[in-house]
Amino acid sequence: MVSVVVSLLLITAVALVVVGMVAVPARQAGRRVLTRRGHATLDTLRDRVTPGASDDAHAPVADDEPARLSA
């Protein structure tokens, strides 16, 4: 049982490192990390935590991005 828990923690740590290696440089280069749907979800969560927090849009969403279909 201990080996299963240690394995899951190790896999989670590796996944976080990979996401960090991809997302942080992309964000620093000015590329958007989230899609339109991701920004909408983040704004909804911000409104739930602090009402009116999404009024000052932090990252504008480009209209030229093709719409993605959700599964």
Image (cartoon, rainbow, N blue to C red):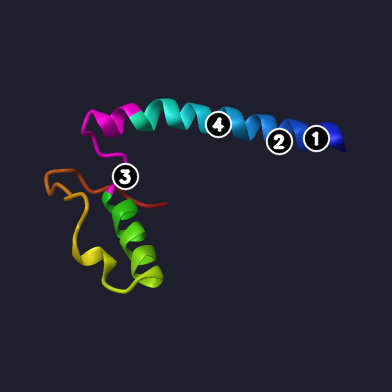
Three-letter amino acid code of the residue under disc 3: Leu
Rounded to the nearest whole Å, what is the CA distance between mark 3 and mark 4? 18 Å
Label 3 belongs to which residue? 34
- Magenta-drawn segment: 25-35
Q: Can you give x and y, in whole percent of width and height, for residue 48 in the image? A: 39, 71
Asked if the stretch drawn in magenta spans residue 40, the answer is no
Mark 4 or mark 2: which comes first in sequence?
A: 2
Asked if the residue at tag 4 contacts the one at tag 3, i.e. Cβ–Cβ closer than 8 Å, the answer is no
Three-letter amino acid code of the residue under disc 1: Val
Disc number for residue 8: 2
Disc number for residue 18: none
Q: Is residue 44 left or right of residue 6?
A: left
- Dominant secondary-structure state across the stretch colored magenta: loop
Q: Is residue 20 left or right of residue 47?
A: right
Asked if the residue at tag 1 contacts the one at tag 2, i.e. Cβ–Cβ closer than 8 Å, the answer is yes
SS state under label 4: helix
The residue located at (78%, 38%) in the rendering is: 5
